[in-house]
Image (spheres, rainbow, N blue to C red):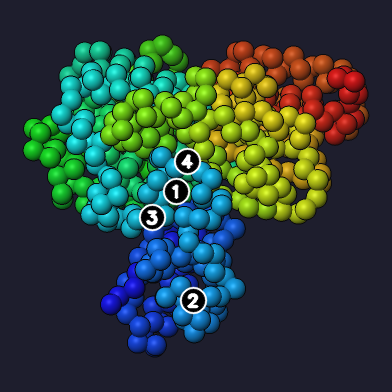
Amino acid sequence: MSTRVYVPRDSGSLSMGAEAVAEAIAVEASRSNQEITLIRNGSRGLYWLEPMVEVETVAGRLAYGPVMPDDVAPLFEAGFLEGGTHRLALGPTAEIPYLKRQERLTFARVGLIDPISLDDYREHGGYRGLDRALSMAGAQVVEEVTASGLRGRGGAGFPAGIKWKTTLQTAAPQKFVVCNADEGDSGTFADRMIMEGDPFVLLEGMTIAGIAVGAAQGYIYLRSEYPHALRTLKQAIALANERGYLGRNLRGSGKTFEIEVRVGAGAYICGEETAMLESLEGRRGMVRYKPPVPAVEGLFGRPTVVNNVITLSSVPVIVEQGADFYKNFGMGRSRGTSPFQLAGNIKYPGLVEKAFGVTLHELVYDFGGGTASGRPLRAVQVGGPLGSYFPESMLEVAMDYEAVAASGGILGHGGIVVFDDTVDLAKMARYAMEFCAIESCGKCTPCRIGSTRGMELIDRIIGNQGRAASAALLRDLCDTMTNASLCALGGLTPLPVMSAIKHFPYAFGLPDESA
């Protein structure tokens, strides 16, 4: 009888040598005349254990990791196909504390299934949401999503149901659904993990959105740095078309929905929805003035639903289980779960899906284990390169949109980057301005010019050239960028700068005004 062995094909795992491990397992199985079925799954998101190999035994799936090619022969000798004891043995995968303490709704299948097996997807509950959506009127689907409290997971946290309802109610001969998969924030990888580990859940979510608002065409705008995701998405789209889950006459319903992938050219600004639409239309990615909003006048001037990967991938479980099921997770106006990505100087980097309300302290210490260096923690940046720096004294903040905003930050895409006490926060603040100057589309003056002037002012502060006056001018400049920039790139760049000055003034040679 063939034993199923799972080795991740996720690009994070591949970077740690998963391909060589898979080859070594195939060779060793052949050499020892043991029959195996090698399945290339997605990563479970426990990146310090990658490559993590799983074996399906009578006791369930058992994990071993991190496995290197040289470990493979000793693993076979230890009888790992039967769950044998070995120094790399982690026990039942589902019982690993890092995983067991999570609430995986959107990521329920990631790491569990073969990403490009539609049968595997169906066996684990896939397309049940679509089946239900096909039996409902579009307005009913929109109401289900609205009632669930689902908000955009791309950063702004705008209610998804409002976007959908606006698009549904806007009359037009053609409508679109666009998935923003231009995941460019530092320390984020949740979108990639979905696309590489469970692509059908994204396709299903987009299809439900199309049915709900009356759109027949969808596009995935994918960042160019994700070649493995591109390959997996294309394979999944072809299979979905072949089996009637995409294309004309969806599952015999008479409805149509097509999906195509478009690859970006590496511009961070195209993560902003209107710049992304410009790029999709074949033009330079530059931010549009709003109104009109994309839900009214989006791609090619047509009503367009624009959501990111996690938002759309959260839709199937909502439609399948109902709004009440989903909104029972979370707190306040932040309902459901969110993937939090732990990166930087952290002992246990990886993805943690938890209901909104988990504290930053729990994520950094209970899941992340503190700094990888073992040195004292200095700062945690939440929300990507334009997120605020939180000192350790503020780690009790709850991870929900309103609580983080009240603390002077943004939740963003859920990226959490940890720094120990060797970090130079003045240099990090300067980097934010430099990043903005490089990535600005150049359309508005506060972002285009303000970021360059910001770098110069920080250099003057660090160099003690009229430090007090330069700091006052920098504050005024940041106020202008926040309130006058056309989009969030210029508007949020002051967050890391001003939070660094507020919480770590000594890094700039400035007095502590909170004393």
Question: Which numbered disc flags the more N-terminal residue, 4 or 3?
Answer: 4
If you read the primary sequence from the N terminus, does the residue marked by circle 3 or circle 2 appear first? Answer: 2
Q: Is residue 147 left or right of residue 479?
A: left
Looking at the image, residue 172 lies above or below residue 258: above
From the viewer's perspective, is 122 left or right of 101? left
Counting from the top left corner in percent of width and height, residue 195 is at 39, 47
Residue 221 locus on image (x, y percent): 37, 38
Q: Residues within 10 Å of mark 3 (few under 14, many from 20)?
A: many
From the viewer's perspective, tell me whether residue 496 is left or right of residue 470.
Answer: left
- Which residue lies under the disc numbered 2? 84
Placement of the C terminus among the 4 image quadrants? top right
Cα distance, mark 2 to mark 4? 29 Å
Question: How packed is label 2: few (under 14 Cα within 10 Å), some, or many (20 or more)?
Answer: some
Left/right of residue 126 with respect to residue 277 in the rendered view: left
User: Given this view, does label 1 or label 4 mark the residue nearer the observer?
Assistant: 4
- Inter-mark Cα distance, 1 to 4: 16 Å
Q: What amino acid does circle 2 point to?
A: Gly
Name the secondary structure under disc 3.
loop
Asked which secondary structure carries label 2, the reply is loop
The residue drawn where x is 52% and y is 24% is: 331
Query: What separation in Å lies between label 3 and label 1 (alpha carbons)?
Result: 12 Å
Which of discs 3 and 2 lies nearer the camera? The answer is 2
Numbered mark located on residue 112 in the image: 3
Give the mark nearer the N terminus: 3 vs 1: 3
Q: Sequence-wise, which precedes: disc 2 or disc 4?
A: 2
| 301 relative to 285, above or below | above
Q: CA separation, marks 4 and 3?
A: 15 Å
Q: Amino acid at mark 4?
A: Glu
Q: Which residue is mark 1?
A: 193
Q: Which mark is residue 103?
A: 4
